[in-house]
Amino acid sequence: MATENLALLKNITVLYAEDEKNLREVTTNILVGFTKKQYIAEDGVQGLELFKENQNDIDLVITDINMPNMNGLDMAKAIKEINPNIPIIVATAFSNTEYLLEAINMGIDKYVLKPVDIKKLLKVMSQSLLYHELKDLYTDNLTHLPNRNRLKKDLNETDEDLMALINIDKFSTINDLFGEDNGDKILYDFSVKLRKIFQEDFFKLYRVEADKFAIISKDVQMDINEFQSRCEAFAQDIEDNEIEVDGNGIDINVTIGIAKSKDHDAYKHTQRVISYARSRYKSILVYDESFNIGANFEENIMWVKKIKTGLKNGDFKAFFQPIVDSNTQKVYKFEALIRYIDEDGTAVAPFKFLDIAKKARLYPEIIKVMIIEAFDAIRAEGIRVALNISFEDIIIKESVDFIMDVLEKNKEYAHLLEFEILESEQIDDFEIVTNFIQLVKQYNCLIGVDDFGAGYSNFNMLTQLDLDFVKIDGSLIKHIDTEPDLKTIVETIVSFAEKVGYKTIAEFVASEDIYNVVKEVGTTYCQGYYFDAPMSMDDLKTKIETKQFELV
């Protein structure tokens, strides 16, 4: 036997179960000489108990078959239910070879005949470990499903594939809320549910990342609509039925991308379509070439380069849109809105690049540009300016330090700066936001919440934070003149804001009809193209100098 195989045994821990005392002592002495640690049992009951207590430590099990209290096969079966991947070797007398078929069926790796030949035992031990070392390369330890390595290998062996990729939504939040141990329980139970819907006779299942699972149809000719229907049934089952952990029900949701493709592209397409599905607020989406996702990726790469270069070259500028008193239409303040100035002088709106900047971790640099531009306008024109700030900005110490430094350097003008916290982004820690508000209010800055009524809106938030105003999301305003339900919602927000002492701003006021309704429901201020479009600093100066604005 090769010395490298013997060396492999030096680092392992063995569970050895044998009821015959003399044989047990002889074999134990040999195991002591060749393995790191040994747990010795006199029967199956004791062996199973030792395994349960030390399963994270034990690398290999050796057991006799005929033992009192619990025989070796029953013990092995119970152990395999706990850890299907543990290598097990059985020792049996020649007269008991009829048990070998049963042993093979339950996944026993090797056997040795009694009386045990030590050289043979050491050989099968090393062979079994080498086999499982290779097997572990392709198996997820938690769910015992094939892993990403196995998926890629399987995909390379086929010319055409029909598959789905399932991503558990916001699984990192689940880990943060309930702990990683409970997170692992959820993942295991999730894999059990997968097995029930997608039986192994028809599908191959994989766990490819922490919160991502893959399904491949063994029948590549399966109708994709039928496959989609099965995925939809699974998603609905997950949504309707909580996963229980320690008696507590935990709700989870999934996003599923489906693709059928030749030339080994199915996995790549499912990965891409999941991101695309989320951007379109879809829980399940089938890949289609018309999505032009590849072109989207190319555009993302282009924008990352543009953002980096633009930040160096000063291509990002603030544009200013007036916010007017709803009753008098006099300009109360201006909102500073980021624009990218392209090579041809075109001002590009933020929906083109802002999300990309956030994902590329470049957004904090844009905030720095905005606060500097805001103070330039305040100092030059003596106007009041508001700018957006996200929860992500507030939790980044570097961004907050920069803001506080600029406020200190401009403290004689700081009272003219207002911050609008984006309410459409989930606020996970109100204490952090409260601390930020306290810091900037030391400079007499006003603070409001932007996009109220979109995303994660809750009225409780308005009572938890020391705010000055609420900006009502444009989705509630732009059709308020034709949809009575929207008017009712806005009236409710305005009424509540007034009771807690906040002023209100209606954005997306694009017509006289909309203006008349928001004025009627009692919003304090209005903003939108009905009054003026966002304008460059030069245009702002011109309009102020020529008195095209009537300032409050």
Image (tube, rainbow, N blue to C red):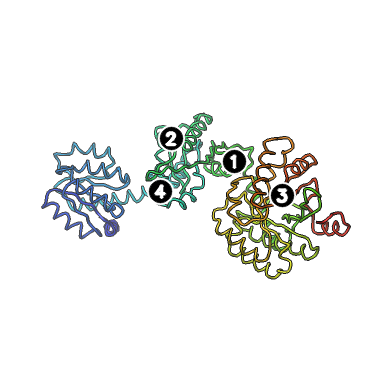
Q: Are marks 3 and 4 in contact (CB under 8 Å)?
A: no
Res. 181 visible in picture: yes
Q: Where is residue 494 in the image (x, y as percent from the top left)?
A: 68, 46
Q: Do the residues labelled 4 and 2 touch (CB within 8 Å)?
A: no
- Would you name the residue on which mark 4 appears? 184
Q: Residue flagged by tag 1: what amino acid is it?
A: Tyr
Q: Position of residue 132 (x, y in %)?
A: 33, 49
Q: Residue flagged by tag 4: what amino acid is it?
A: Asp
Res. 302 visible in picture: no
Identity of the residue furthest to the left in this view? 22
Badge 2 crowding class, 10 Å Cα cut-off, few under 14, some 14 to 19, many 20 or more, is: some
| Residue 152 position (above or below residue 364) | above
Q: Are marks 3 and 1 in contact (CB under 8 Å)?
A: no
Q: Nearer the viewer, mark 3 or mark 4?
A: 3
- Would you name the residue on which mark 3 appears? 505
Is disc 3 placed on a helix, strand or loop?
strand
Q: Nearer the viewer, mark 3 or mark 1?
A: 3
Q: Is residue 302 left or right of residue 114?
A: right
Q: Residue at x 59, y 47 (%)?
A: 458
Q: Quadrant of residue 187?
A: top left
State the CA–CA distance, disc 3 to disc 4: 46 Å
